[in-house]
Image (cartoon, helix red, strand yellow):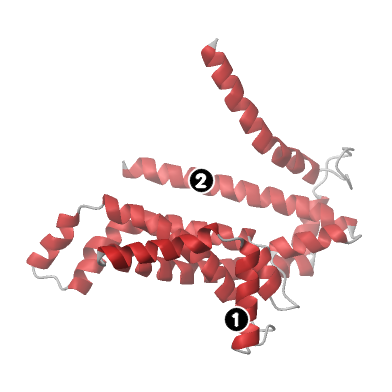
Amino acid sequence: MKKILIHSWIWLVLAFLYAPILILAVYSFTDSTMIGSIRGFSFANYETLVTTPALVSMILGTLSLAIGVAIISTLLGTVGAIGSFYSRRKIRTAIELSNQIPVVNADVVTGFSVCILMIAIFHINKDTFIPLVIGQTCLCVPFVYLSVIPRLKQMDQQLYEAALDLGCTPASALWKVIIPQIVPGITSGFMTAITLSLDDYFVATYTKPATFDTISTYVVNATKGSQTEIKTALWALSTVIFVVVILCVLGSNYVKKEEK
């Protein structure tokens, strides 16, 4: 009876988490214009998604932004994690505390602060992508740091010392010993940064150029409008994103099993 209750609770939680997404996926393959009435099977939403210039431009722009921000965040977060790990205890503690602030801070505060900093103080034009990139980088770097630090702690520290004893310079030992050991953490941080950038709404709202939309800001604005065709196409977009995430998770787990 205890096992039955445990399994029932697990399935209930999974249903609560994924049932809305699965329902949305079902509706994306129909001619329905609103949730609640299922009509005939159709690929019209997916056709609209790939043939509407505004949607295609928005998706490509969001992906380009996410990849660019992820690369910058991964570099900064990895360097920060390595520097913090090999620093003195007081410096390391100060860096760790500083890194926790953006993590627990509200995104809206980060976005508004970056907007004020870039425009009011440095007089950078908001029509450029500089405030947006900086804002999302500030959002993502702490999570990359948190992904890399555990790998550094799990690493055998004697390998680095052995490399130095065998004639490697600190820089050479970094690239030949430390970096290969923490690649899983770097990869995890990179994927997390992409996810955060794609999911971000508040920072993008305050810092993006007026003529540019990310997926999050576009979806919010579309739900306020009256273009039913665009709204239903976003059901298809949500389904595609969900499928891609599942494939990435399955691929990551497969790679980890192969490494073991």
Closer to us: 35 or 29: 35
Q: Label for residue 249?
A: 2
- Residue at 51% x, 45% y is 249
Q: Position of residue 114 (x, y in %)?
A: 60, 75
Across and down, in percent, residue 60 comes to 66, 68
Q: Quadrant of the C terminus?
A: top left
Q: Mark 1: which amino acid?
A: Leu
Q: Is residue 157 left or right of residue 22?
A: left
Dot placed on the residue nearer the N-terminal end, 2 or 1 = 1
Disc 1 crowd rating (10 Å Cα; few below 14, some 14-19, many 20+) is some
Give the left or right position of residue 191, taking residue 164 as reference. Answer: right
Is residue 260 visible in the rendered image? The answer is yes
Q: Residue at 52% x, 63% y: name it.
A: 102
- Name the foreground residue: 45 vs 107: 107
- Please tell me whether residue 105 is drawn above or below residue 205 in the rendered image: above
Q: Distance between the residues labelled 2 and 1?
A: 37 Å
- Name the element at disc 1: helix
Say above or below: 35 vs 234.
above
Q: Residue 117 carries which label?
A: 1
Q: In this view, does 52 lie above or below 126?
A: above
Does 73 sit left or right of 157 as displayed?
right
Q: Which-is-in-front pick, marks 2 and 1?
A: 1
The image quadrant of residue 79 is bottom left
For the residue marked with disc 2, what is the amino acid? Answer: Val
| Residue 139 drawn at (x, y percent) | 54, 65
| Nearer-the-camera pick, 228 or 182 | 182
At 37% from the left and 68% from the top, the residue drawn is 80
Other-residue count near label 2 (Cα within 10 Å), few / some / many at <14 / 14–19 / ≥20: few
Determine whether label 2 and label 1 are within 8 Å by CB: no
Look at the picture and state if 80 lies above or below 18.
below
Q: Quadrant of residue 82?
A: bottom left
